[in-house]
Image: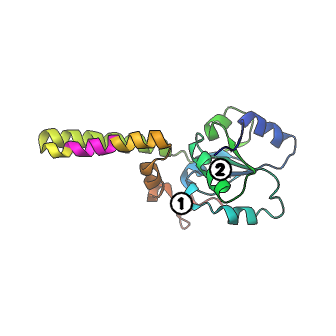
Protein backbone atom coordinates (compact mmCIF):
# COMPACT_ATOMS: atom_id res chain seq x y z
CA UNK A 1 0.00 0.00 0.00
CA UNK A 2 1.07 3.51 -0.69
CA UNK A 3 0.35 6.47 1.52
CA UNK A 4 1.54 10.03 1.84
CA UNK A 5 4.52 10.99 3.97
CA UNK A 6 5.64 14.27 5.46
CA UNK A 7 8.97 15.36 6.87
CA UNK A 8 9.08 16.65 10.44
CA UNK A 9 10.29 20.00 9.07
CA UNK A 10 7.25 20.32 6.79
CA UNK A 11 4.92 19.27 9.63
CA UNK A 12 6.53 21.96 11.79
CA UNK A 13 6.00 24.58 9.08
CA UNK A 14 2.33 23.65 8.76
CA UNK A 15 1.87 23.76 12.52
CA UNK A 16 3.71 27.10 12.87
CA UNK A 17 1.55 28.61 10.09
CA UNK A 18 -1.59 27.75 12.07
CA UNK A 19 -2.78 24.80 10.00
CA UNK A 20 -4.68 22.13 11.92
CA UNK A 21 -2.38 19.16 12.43
CA UNK A 22 -4.26 16.20 13.88
CA UNK A 23 -1.35 14.00 15.01
CA UNK A 24 -1.67 10.54 16.56
CA UNK A 25 1.34 8.96 18.25
CA UNK A 26 1.01 5.16 17.97
CA UNK A 27 3.76 4.24 20.45
CA UNK A 28 3.11 2.64 23.83
CA UNK A 29 1.78 4.96 26.54
CA UNK A 30 5.08 4.73 28.42
CA UNK A 31 7.10 5.72 25.32
CA UNK A 32 4.68 8.58 24.69
CA UNK A 33 5.06 9.77 28.26
CA UNK A 34 8.85 9.87 27.82
CA UNK A 35 8.78 12.34 24.92
CA UNK A 36 6.21 13.38 22.35
CA UNK A 37 5.21 16.19 20.03
CA UNK A 38 3.20 18.67 22.08
CA UNK A 39 0.04 18.51 19.97
CA UNK A 40 0.08 14.71 19.49
CA UNK A 41 -2.42 12.44 21.16
CA UNK A 42 -1.60 8.86 22.04
CA UNK A 43 -3.42 5.84 20.66
CA UNK A 44 -1.16 2.76 20.76
CA UNK A 45 -0.94 0.81 17.50
CA UNK A 46 -2.62 -2.28 18.95
CA UNK A 47 -5.59 -0.17 20.12
CA UNK A 48 -6.26 1.78 16.92
CA UNK A 49 -9.80 1.52 15.60
CA UNK A 50 -9.76 3.51 12.36
CA UNK A 51 -13.52 4.09 12.24
CA UNK A 52 -13.70 5.25 15.86
CA UNK A 53 -10.79 7.65 15.36
CA UNK A 54 -12.32 9.14 12.23
CA UNK A 55 -15.76 9.41 13.83
CA UNK A 56 -14.29 11.44 16.72
CA UNK A 57 -12.69 13.98 14.37
CA UNK A 58 -15.93 16.04 14.38
CA UNK A 59 -16.20 17.17 10.79
CA UNK A 60 -12.48 17.28 10.07
CA UNK A 61 -12.45 13.91 8.31
CA UNK A 62 -11.40 15.64 5.08
CA UNK A 63 -8.25 17.03 6.66
CA UNK A 64 -5.12 14.87 6.81
CA UNK A 65 -4.54 12.63 9.80
CA UNK A 66 -0.85 12.50 10.68
CA UNK A 67 0.61 9.37 12.30
CA UNK A 68 3.90 9.12 14.17
CA UNK A 69 5.88 6.59 16.20
CA UNK A 70 9.49 6.34 17.36
CA UNK A 71 11.20 5.84 13.99
CA UNK A 72 8.47 5.31 11.39
CA UNK A 73 7.71 1.59 11.27
CA UNK A 74 4.69 1.43 13.56
CA UNK A 75 3.18 4.59 12.07
CA UNK A 76 3.44 2.97 8.61
CA UNK A 77 1.51 0.01 9.98
CA UNK A 78 -1.10 2.41 11.39
CA UNK A 79 -1.40 4.14 7.99
CA UNK A 80 -2.06 0.72 6.45
CA UNK A 81 -4.79 0.02 9.05
CA UNK A 82 -6.54 3.27 8.13
CA UNK A 83 -6.25 2.59 4.41
CA UNK A 84 -7.61 -0.94 4.81
CA UNK A 85 -10.61 0.62 6.60
CA UNK A 86 -11.16 2.94 3.62
CA UNK A 87 -9.54 6.15 4.93
CA UNK A 88 -6.95 7.44 2.47
CA UNK A 89 -6.12 10.87 3.86
CA UNK A 90 -3.49 9.56 6.30
CA UNK A 91 0.09 10.82 6.37
CA UNK A 92 3.13 9.13 7.92
CA UNK A 93 5.66 11.41 9.64
CA UNK A 94 9.05 10.35 8.27
CA UNK A 95 11.63 9.41 10.88
CA UNK A 96 9.12 9.60 13.73
CA UNK A 97 9.68 11.24 17.07
CA UNK A 98 13.44 10.81 16.75
CA UNK A 99 13.49 13.03 13.66
CA UNK A 100 11.04 15.53 15.17
CA UNK A 101 13.49 16.27 17.96
CA UNK A 102 15.79 17.82 15.34
CA UNK A 103 13.15 20.38 14.31
CA UNK A 104 11.48 23.29 16.03
CA UNK A 105 8.34 21.27 16.77
CA UNK A 106 7.28 21.77 20.39
CA UNK A 107 8.16 18.63 22.34
CA UNK A 108 7.03 17.45 25.76
CA UNK A 109 9.82 15.77 27.72
CA UNK A 110 8.75 13.50 30.54
CA UNK A 111 10.14 10.50 32.32
CA UNK A 112 12.70 8.83 30.05
CA UNK A 113 12.01 5.21 29.19
CA UNK A 114 13.63 2.46 27.17
CA UNK A 115 12.30 2.36 23.60
CA UNK A 116 10.46 -0.70 22.38
CA UNK A 117 13.11 -1.28 19.69
CA UNK A 118 15.83 -1.38 22.37
CA UNK A 119 13.75 -3.78 24.48
CA UNK A 120 13.45 -6.10 21.46
CA UNK A 121 17.23 -6.08 20.91
CA UNK A 122 17.87 -6.88 24.58
CA UNK A 123 15.27 -9.67 24.68
CA UNK A 124 16.41 -11.25 21.39
CA UNK A 125 20.07 -11.08 22.37
CA UNK A 126 19.35 -12.56 25.79
CA UNK A 127 17.37 -15.46 24.29
CA UNK A 128 20.08 -16.22 21.72
CA UNK A 129 22.80 -16.13 24.38
CA UNK A 130 20.71 -18.32 26.69
CA UNK A 131 20.10 -20.84 23.90
CA UNK A 132 23.80 -21.02 23.05
CA UNK A 133 24.88 -21.40 26.69
CA UNK A 134 22.24 -24.06 27.45
CA UNK A 135 23.05 -25.87 24.20
CA UNK A 136 26.72 -25.93 25.07
CA UNK A 137 26.40 -26.69 28.80
CA UNK A 138 23.18 -28.74 29.11
CA UNK A 139 21.95 -30.31 25.86
CA UNK A 140 22.43 -29.51 22.16
CA UNK A 141 18.64 -29.31 21.68
CA UNK A 142 18.74 -25.88 23.36
CA UNK A 143 20.50 -24.51 20.26
CA UNK A 144 16.99 -24.61 18.79
CA UNK A 145 16.06 -21.59 20.93
CA UNK A 146 18.76 -19.53 19.26
CA UNK A 147 17.66 -20.79 15.83
CA UNK A 148 14.03 -19.92 16.61
CA UNK A 149 14.93 -16.36 17.65
CA UNK A 150 17.17 -15.97 14.60
CA UNK A 151 14.34 -17.11 12.31
CA UNK A 152 12.00 -14.66 14.04
CA UNK A 153 14.44 -11.80 13.44
CA UNK A 154 14.74 -12.72 9.75
CA UNK A 155 10.94 -12.83 9.49
CA UNK A 156 10.69 -9.43 11.21
CA UNK A 157 13.21 -7.97 8.78
CA UNK A 158 11.49 -9.37 5.70
CA UNK A 159 7.92 -8.48 6.71
CA UNK A 160 8.69 -5.31 8.70
CA UNK A 161 6.55 -6.67 11.56
CA UNK A 162 7.93 -7.87 14.85
CA UNK A 163 6.05 -10.38 16.96
CA UNK A 164 8.42 -9.88 19.87
CA UNK A 165 7.86 -6.12 19.70
CA UNK A 166 4.09 -6.59 19.70
CA UNK A 167 4.38 -8.91 22.69
CA UNK A 168 6.69 -6.54 24.60
CA UNK A 169 4.33 -3.61 23.91
CA UNK A 170 1.69 -5.42 25.98
CA UNK A 171 3.98 -5.98 28.97
CA UNK A 172 3.09 -4.17 32.21
CA UNK A 173 6.20 -1.97 32.16
CA UNK A 174 5.07 -0.59 28.79
CA UNK A 175 1.61 0.30 30.08
CA UNK A 176 0.36 3.09 32.30
CA UNK A 177 -1.48 2.41 35.51
CA UNK A 178 -4.18 5.02 36.15
CA UNK A 179 -3.83 4.66 39.93
CA UNK A 180 -0.17 5.68 39.91
CA UNK A 181 0.37 9.45 39.46
CA UNK A 182 3.94 8.83 38.29
CA UNK A 183 2.69 6.71 35.40
CA UNK A 184 -0.59 8.44 34.58
CA UNK A 185 -1.78 7.57 31.10
CA UNK A 186 -1.95 10.32 28.53
CA UNK A 187 -5.42 11.55 27.78
Compared across the picture, whether 69 is left or right of 167 comes to right
Q: Secondary structure at mark 2?
A: helix
Residue 145: image location, x then y, percent: 26, 46
**Disc 2: which residue:** 79
Q: Are marks 1 and 2 in contact (CB under 8 Å)?
A: no
Quarter of the image holding residue 183?
Answer: bottom right
Label 1 neighbour load within 10 Å: few <14, some 14-19, many 20+: some
Q: Secondary structure at mark 1?
A: loop
Residue nearest the observer in this picture, 172 or 65: 65
Residue 134: image location, x then y, percent: 18, 43
In the rendered image, is residue 114 in sight? no
**Disc 1: which residue:** 176
Q: Residue at x 39, y 41 (%)?
A: 153
Question: Vertically, is 155 above or below 43?
Answer: above
Q: Residue at x 12, y 45 (%)?
A: 139
Q: CA distance from mark 1 to mark 2?
A: 24 Å
For residue 88, which numbered disc appears in the image? none
Q: Residue at x 27, y 42 (%)?
A: 146
Compared across the picture, whether 118 is left or right of 182 comes to left
Label 2 neighbour load within 10 Å: few <14, some 14-19, many 20+: many
Residue 99: image location, x then y, percent: 64, 34
Residues rendered magenta in the picture: 143-150
Amino acid sequence: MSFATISPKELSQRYQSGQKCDLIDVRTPVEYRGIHVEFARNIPLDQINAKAVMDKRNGSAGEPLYLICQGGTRSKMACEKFQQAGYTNVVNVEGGTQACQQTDLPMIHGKQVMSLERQVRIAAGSLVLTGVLLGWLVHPAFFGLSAFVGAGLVFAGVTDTCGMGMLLAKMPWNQCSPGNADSACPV
